[in-house]
Amino acid sequence: MTPYAISLFFNTRIFRIVLLLLSMVFVLAKVSTAQVTPFNHSGLKWRTMEGQFHVLHYHVGSERTAREILNIADAVHPQLVELYHYTPDTKVHWVVYDTDDYANGATYYLNNKIIIWAPALDFEFRGSHHWLRNVVTHEYAHMIQLGAARKWSREIPGIYTQVIDYEKESRPDVLYGFPNRIISYPVINTVVPHWFAEGTAQSMRKGMNFDYRDSHREMLLRTRSLTGNLLTLDEMGVFEKNSLGGELVYNQGFSLVQYISDRYGEASFRKLSEAMAKPMTWTLDGACRNALGVSARELYNDWSRTLKETYSQRTTTIRANEVNGRLLEEDGFGNLYPRWSNDGKNIYFVSNKEKDFFGGSKVVKYDVESGKKDKLFVTSAPFAIHPNDSAIVYSHQPLTKDQRRLNDLYWYNIQKKKSYRLTYEARVQQPDISSDGNSIVAITQSDGTSNLILIELPDLVMKDIPRKSPLPSRTLTNYTNGEQVSQPRFSPDGKSILFSLVTDENRDLIMLDVASGKTELLRESRWDDRNAAWSRDGKWIYFTSDSTGIWNVYRMSSDRTTIEPVTNVVGGALFGEPSPDGTELAFSRYE
């Protein structure tokens, strides 16, 4: 498994850079089959609305999300039914939850039921799409495609035959001896490998561009393909891996399914599903031979060879002129969100290190001079360093009394190595601290929409913080229609805040004036711009963009007259963070 890195190099045209090339994580956000069962929150007040093809159940507080889901589901129903020649035998029931800070969708295709969680997926290593159009169409594509691939009624998930043999027993008081042979043979209703199920759900059908192979997906495919490390066809069939391996099932499945569509036509999705539904077809290979006239192995080999040839041609110039830096951290596959201490002596970052999944990640303190690393506390989200280097503010999801997982802010005293809770069930995350240490900007969300909130910190630097009274706060933005904001950063003078905004597809960088609340688009771009960070003198804004099709770190002058690249990598470079003196840069690199 290839990690991220941290690098040192010297470039006289730009400046010396310490590249915190931190490995990228792909926390499996499973927008497919069910794996999370919500708690039965008895205090919720439920409502039901019904559309032409669907019935939707939602609780008070999630009505905006519910109405949009119903409209999308009714709109995509005819197109998916037409593609697969399959219609569910009842109206499909949808259940909407906004009880937890958790984004996902789950299809129970044998029950004609789908669950959607209202919070939008803010996943660093997938592109930014309209969440509800994406997840609703994805889950309903599962419902239709898996239904089309069923061998018989959905009331019978599977059957098996079993033969049991017994030892001979000669005693007259014993009817038969102990079992000595058991032969079981299962017959499964639906034979669909994970890569095909996820690939077709992401491809949806032509004209439905609610999900696509964005620069994050291309990053995973490109690096794996060029190094000969693609998952095998057998490995693509299951999710029994770490979170990075699980995400690769999605990405490779998406790519392979699109290859099938390009070569054999979109109707091949239906033909393969119908072949899998035949009583005597028990493998994907049999379905491929029946529907496409080739074996699954031949299909996989042709696709992987085409993929490598394509990426090799596209990256020839880049590979001859790479600007990578020197590796500082290679343990784990997820090393993210680097932040310098204000004295420039330490770099802090989130790392999963020995963990198979990113959820158990910890903040790591890296001593620049000695190279010593210390693990501090558990979090897998962006955090902030206090300007006097005394504390770190971060988010965590404690379990509430009514069994909910909600984001709250915590204050970690670096000297005492102790955390104090700042908020209670406030649903806030991704904090940044103003240069005077008196304010925190963070993100809060409700009913599938997120906004910026400003929290005041009266005398918190001088005192320990065990208090349960709410901190003074005010909302900075007033989005109401599913907009998503992320990773806010104060300007050095505290007068402005940079953040990323998603309204439909991709992210734009927005500048907000704290006093007036006015917002301004940082630059006109059809690309995805994100991960903004200021130089300490306020002269430069560093950000990540996929304007070349590959994620790289750029910097823009504060007067916006100059934009120049800082990195040039084959994989991807994100989260650029300049050092306090402006001579070094820490960032995450995927390779």
Image (spheres, rainbow, N blue to C red):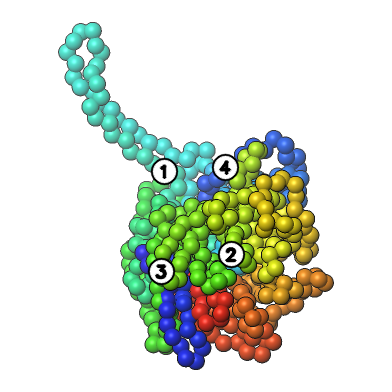
Q: How much space separates mark 4 and mark 1, taking CA atoms? A: 24 Å
Label located before the other in sequence (2 or 4): 4
Question: Dot 4 corresponds to which residue?
Answer: 37
Mark 2: secondary structure: loop
Crowd tier of the residue under label 3, counting other residues whose Cα lies within 10 Å: few below 14, some 14–19, many 20 or above:
few
Mark 4: secondary structure: loop
Pick the residue in front: 438 or 326.
438
Question: Dot 2 corresponds to which residue?
Answer: 389
Instruction: Name the outermost residue toward the front.
Output: 462
Q: How much space separates mark 1 and mark 2, taking CA atoms? A: 59 Å
* Mark toward the viewer: 4 or 1: 4
Image quarter (top left, top right, bottom left or bottom right) of the N terminus: bottom left
* Mark toward the viewer: 3 or 1: 3
Label located before the other in sequence (4 or 3): 4
Residue at the location (65% across, 38% down)? Answer: 401
Instruction: Using the image, tell me which numbered label, if any, was put on residue 224.
Output: none
Question: Dot 3 corresponds to which residue?
Answer: 370
Q: How much space separates mark 2 and mark 4, taking CA atoms? A: 41 Å
Question: Dot 1 corresponds to which residue?
Answer: 188
* Mark toward the viewer: 2 or 4: 2
Amino acid type, mark 1: Ile
Amino acid type, mark 3: Ser
Q: Is residue 551 visible?
A: no
Instruction: Name the outermost residue toward the right.
Output: 516
Mark 1: secondary structure: strand
Label located before the other in sequence (2 or 3): 3
Mark 3: secondary structure: loop
Residue at the location (50% across, 61% down)? Answer: 350
Image quarter (top left, top right, bottom left or bottom right) of the C terminus: bottom left
Q: Position of residue 348 (x, y in %)?
A: 51, 65
Amino acid type, mark 4: Thr
